[in-house]
Image (cartoon, rainbow, N blue to C red):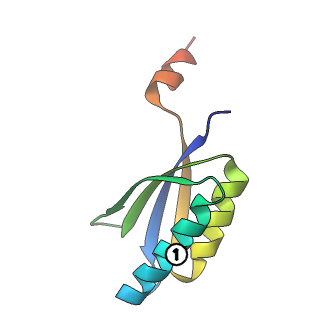
Amino acid sequence: MVNMLFITLCRFRKKPTKEMMAEAQRLFEEAAKEGVKILGIYWVLGRYDVVLVSECPDEKTHMKMAIRFGDIVSTESLVAVRSEEAVKLLT
């Protein structure tokens, strides 16, 4: 089965610290054990602070990961479809 692709937009709940980032790293490692693959983490300017690109076995696995990060960030998750796959859906 092919993993689902997610784009997660994050806002820090408070000013980030090194301790918060260490906790986030621990949570990512925990998620990896459940099949989550982090493809990229980007700090960005604008409305959001971080953009996370990940692959998860299913939406429930992604939701579980997002909930774990609830004390660190608020999130908005988007399910993504690769453009090659989306073009095949055109009729």
Mark 1: few/some/many CA within 10 Å (<14, 14-19, 20+): few
Location of the C terminus (image quadrant): top right
Q: Which residue is the extreme one toward the top?
A: 91
* Residue where numbered disc 1 is placed: 26
Residue 90 in picture, x, y percent from top left = 54, 16
Location of the N terminus (image quadrant): top right
Is 67 on the left or on the right of 81, as rendered?
Answer: right
Residue 41 in picture, x, y percent from top left = 38, 60
Q: Which residue is the extreme one toward the left?
A: 45
Camera-side residue: 40 or 13? 40
**What is the total number of numbered labels drawn onto the structure image?**
1
Is 13 on the left or on the right of 62, as rendered?
Answer: left
Q: Residue at x 65, y 71 (%)?
A: 67
Residue 62 in picture, x, y percent from top left = 63, 57
Camera-side residue: 1 or 52? 1
In this view of the protein, can residue 47 be seen by the observer? yes
Is 13 on the left or on the right of 48, as rendered?
Answer: right
Q: Residue at x 68, y 56 (%)?
A: 61
Q: Under tag 1, what secondary structure?
A: helix
Q: Residue at x 54, y 67 (%)?
A: 29
Badge 1 amino acid: Arg
